[in-house]
Image (cartoon, rainbow, N blue to C red):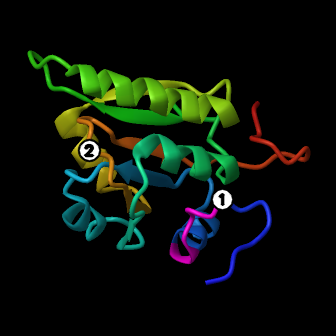
């Protein structure tokens, strides 16, 4: 496998193909190692289940968001899994969410990153274009990104 300049090396050829194949409004689920990724991916548009070995959620999002424009024509650009009502988010879960937001905002500072209740998250993930599974072990390390457009300046198109 050869590397390319300015392309994060953790992004596999299959993942680069998925990112390039996605259109405006398509969604990408980036999930942890405990997520039912194979089952969910079997319901997605492309049926793609990509595994990023040795990569945690913040690393994956940092590399993906370096290339993927987010959809600022939607109210929410990124959704993340949150516990169902009555369940408290564990300390490690809050840690991964804070790092996730940091990775996303590094590339798209204006992105709205909002919670999606756990079971609603599973339903929305099944409508995604593809699933990218990381080896993230902290709980609730799951996000759905909505692909946007690249503006004339080469950045996210923000209305």
Residue projecting furthest to the front: 54
Circle 2 is placed at which residue position?
A: 137
- Do we see residue 75 in this rendering? no
The x, y position of residue 22, in whole percent, is: 57, 63
Q: Look at the picture and state if 44 lies above or below 146.
A: below
**Is the magenta region chiefly helix, strand or loop?**
loop
The x, y position of residue 136, in whole percent, is: 32, 47
Crowd class of label 1 (few under 14; some 14 to 19; many from 20; radius 10 Å): some
The x, y position of residue 137, in whole percent, is: 26, 44
Displayed quadrant of residue 133 = bottom left
Which residue is found at the position 37% from the left and 31% from the top? 96
- Looking at the rendered image, the quarter that the N terminus falls into is bottom right
Displayed quadrant of residue 129 = bottom left
- Looking at the rendered image, the quarter that the C terminus falls into is top right
Q: Look at the picture and state if 12 lies above or below 110.
A: below
The answer to which of 140 and 27 lies nearer the viewer is 140
Q: Look at the picture and state if 156 lies above or below 85.
A: below
- Do we see residue 66 in this rendering? yes
41 displayed left or right of 1 = left
The x, y position of residue 29, in whole percent, is: 40, 52
The magenta region covers: 8-14
Which residue is found at the position 32% from the left and 39% from the top? 141
Which residue is found at the position 34% from the left and 50% from the top? 31
Q: Look at the picture and state if 38 lies above or below 109.
A: below
Task: Please tell me whether mark 1 sits on a helix, a strand or a loop.
Answer: loop
Circle 1 is placed at which residue position?
A: 8
Q: Are the residues tagged 1 and 2 within 8 Å (C-beta)?
A: no
Residue projecting furthest to the left: 86
Residue 132 badge: none
* Distance from the alpha carbon under mark 1 to that under mark 2: 22 Å
Which residue is found at the position 55% from the left and 27% from the top? 102
């Amino acid at each position: 496998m050869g590397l390319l300049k300015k392309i994060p090396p953790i992004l596999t050829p299959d993942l680069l193909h998925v990112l390039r194949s996605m259109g405006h409004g398509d969604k990408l689920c980036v999930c942890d190692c405990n997520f039912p990724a194979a089952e969910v991916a079997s319901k997605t548009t492309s049926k793609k289940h990509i595994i990023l070995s040795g990569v945690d959620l913040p690393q994956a999002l940092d590399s993906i968001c370096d290339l993927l424009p987010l959809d600022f024509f939607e109210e929410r650009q990124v959704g993340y899994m949150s516990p169902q009502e009555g369940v408290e988010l564990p300390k490690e879960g809050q840690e991964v969410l804070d790092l996730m937001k940091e990775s996303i905002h590094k590339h798209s500072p204006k992105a709205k990153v909002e919670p999606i209740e756990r079971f609603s998250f599973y339903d929305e993930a099944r409508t995604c274009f593809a699933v990218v599974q990381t080896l993230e072990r902290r709980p609730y390390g799951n996000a759905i990104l909505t692909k946007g457009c690249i503006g004339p300046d080469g950045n996210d198109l923000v209305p």
